[in-house]
Image (cartoon, helix red, strand yellow):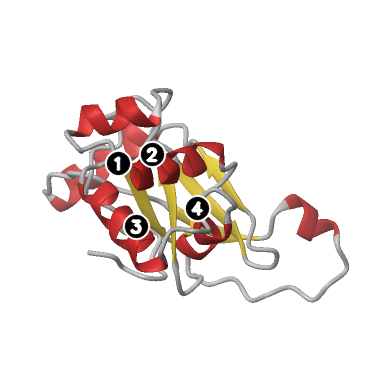
């Protein structure tokens, strides 16, 4: 269940550590038990080359994928998501972003330029244990979504966007 606008929202239900991020697209598909189709391989190559999470529309506009039907791209992303090969992120943009499963991290999204940064949080395990203990729950997965202004936008003399809390 996704809680839009909240700090603690489960963005996906897949194990972030299940697949090796450095593996080739073909190896990722094999590990996930999926057939190695040209569309899946092309999408995984594009996601692997991406420096940050990308939308399905961005993927569709890439030269090596532009000939693939848009519906096929979305269906393939759904299959890769269900198999735990990709993560789907909701970053308050009104559309999903996708990235390959890799080491567990969270995201910071700049409210002004929409830049996305991968962030690691020190003390995260202790925080999760404290939450589980306080609320008497077993946490299966989690994601932390941070928003604000990146360092580039902080240095610009533009009006600040209100920070959601």
Q: Nearer the viewer, mark 4 or mark 3?
A: 4
Residue pointed to by mark 3? 8
* CA distance separating discs 2 and 4: 10 Å
Classify residue 56 by image quadrant.
bottom left
* CA distance separating discs 4 and 3: 34 Å
What is the x, y in percent for residue 99?
Answer: 44, 46
Residue pointed to by mark 4? 65
Residue pointed to by mark 1? 37
What is the x, y in percent for residue 160?
Answer: 74, 73
Q: Contact, CB < 8 Å: mark 2 with mark 4?
A: no
Q: Contact, CB < 8 Å: mark 1 with mark 2?
A: yes
Residue that appears at 77% across and 60% down: 153
What is the x, y in percent for residue 95?
Answer: 45, 70
Between discs 4 and 3, the one toward the N terminus:
3
Between discs 2 and 3, the one toward the N terminus:
3
Between discs 3 and 1, the one toward the N terminus:
3
Residue 41 has which mark? 2
Q: Nearer the viewer, mark 3 or mark 1?
A: 1
Check disc 2 and report its element: helix, strand or loop.
helix
Classify residue 132 by image quadrant.
top left
């Amino acid at each position: 269940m996704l809680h839009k606008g909240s700090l603690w929202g489960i963005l996906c239900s897949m194990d972030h550590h299940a697949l090796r991020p450095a593996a080739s697209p073909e190896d990722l598909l094999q590990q996930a038990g999926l057939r190695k189709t040209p569309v899946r391989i092309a999408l995984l190559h594009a996601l692997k080359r991406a420096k940050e999470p990308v939308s399905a529309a961005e993927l569709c506009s890439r030269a090596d994928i532009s000939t693939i039907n848009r519906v096929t791209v979305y269906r393939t992303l759904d299959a890769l998501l269900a198999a735990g090969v990709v993560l789907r992120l909701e970053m308050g943009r009104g559309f999903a972003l996708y990235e390959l499963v890799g080491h567990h991290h969270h995201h910071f999204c700049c409210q002004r330029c929409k830049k996305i940064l991968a962030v690691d949080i020190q003390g995260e395990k202790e925080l999760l244990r404290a939450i589980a203990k306080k609320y008497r729950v077993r946490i299966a997965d989690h994601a932390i979504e941070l928003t604000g202004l990146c360092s580039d936008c902080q240095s610009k003399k533009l009006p600040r966007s209100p920070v959601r809390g």
